[in-house]
Amino acid sequence: MSKLIAVAGKGGTGKTTVAALVIRYLLKTKRTPIFAVDADPNYTLGEALGIEVEQTIGMMREEFIGERAEIPSGMSKEAVLDRQMHATLQEAKDVDLLVMGRQEGPGCYCYLNNVLRKFMDILAADYPFVVVDNEAGMEHLSRRNTRKIDLLLVVSDHSVKAARAAGRIVLLVEELKLEVGRRYLVLNRSPDNISKEVQAEIDRSGLDVLVKLPEDPEVQKADVVGTPLIDLPDDAPSIVSLGPALDPLF
Ligand SMILES: Nc1ncnc2c1ncn2[C@@H]1O[C@H](COP(=O)(O)OP(=O)(O)OP(=O)(O)O)[C@@H](O)[C@H]1O
Ligand SMILES: [Mg+2]
């Protein structure tokens, strides 16, 4: 059984950064292979992992719809989709990345999306660890409520708005009746002292703070130079903070 780790949170708070740092941790601690899913239509996890993204599920869906007439004889629609899904997977050492890309378009592709979701679950089951970088809206999580989330990391920065959004994600998870093993708040770009207003929102969310990640100059540097976060040095402040917080969870 694979362990599903989902990262969620308000836009711009550091979801992709946290997802990449969790993947880096899993790689370093030899918990591989990892199946990484970028569920944000504005995908950036590939860059954080140093994996070039050439194809997304969204692109593949559009191509499939365009070429539907050309399904080779003797092959089922499902078999073609399965083959194309494997071709969409970007493979790197110990981590394979699936990028969802644009979500459902204006048409109704319910059949197609259901088949794709089924294949994605089958694909994910082959990996001991699955890490999903969600879009701010949680659409991906809400659509795929069949699987259990073993670990939900809700990211917030040191702001009332983001901490409140974290609370709304908890409510959404409950509303959708998603089965969640453990859930924590990751307070990103956190100062040493949390303002009482932010603390009050965190308390209201009901989430325990797993870790306070500091503002990290190494993350900023990676941003400016365009190097993958996966290559951050071991002594980068965010890495130093996150490792010991994750250790007891695995
Ligand atoms: N701890 C940190 N220290 C310094 N910079 C950070 C830190 N965490 C995130 N950042 C920077 O903040 C910006 C937003 O982070 P990131 O892209 O991870 O957020 P996100 O929640 O995934 O955003 P989006 O909602 O757009 O997907 C990035 O430029 C990232 O490099
Ligand atoms: Mg992101």
Image (cartoon, grey):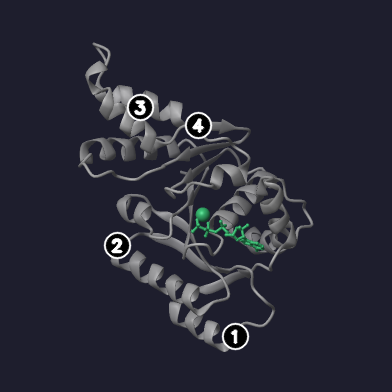
- For label 1, the SS is loop
Tell me which numbered mark, 2 or 3, is placed earlier along the sequence: 3
Give the number of the mark in front: 2 or 4.
4
Taking 192 as reference, is 97 left or right? left
Decide: few, some or many residues near mark 4? Use Cα within 10 Å; few <14, some 14-19, many ≥20: few
Q: Which residue is mark 3?
A: 82
Which amino acid does the dot numbered 4 rest on? Glu
Q: Which residue is mark 2?
A: 176
Seen in the picture, residue 62 relative to 103 is either above or below; the reply is above
Which amino acid does the dot numbered 3 rest on? Asp
* Residue 97 position within the rendered picture, expressed as x and y whole percent measured from the top left: 52, 38
Residues at discs 1 and 3 in contact (Cβ within 8 Å):
no
Taking 160 as reference, is 210 left or right? right
Return the mark for residue 195.
1
Which amino acid does the dot numbered 1 rest on? Ser
Which amino acid does the dot numbered 2 rest on? Leu
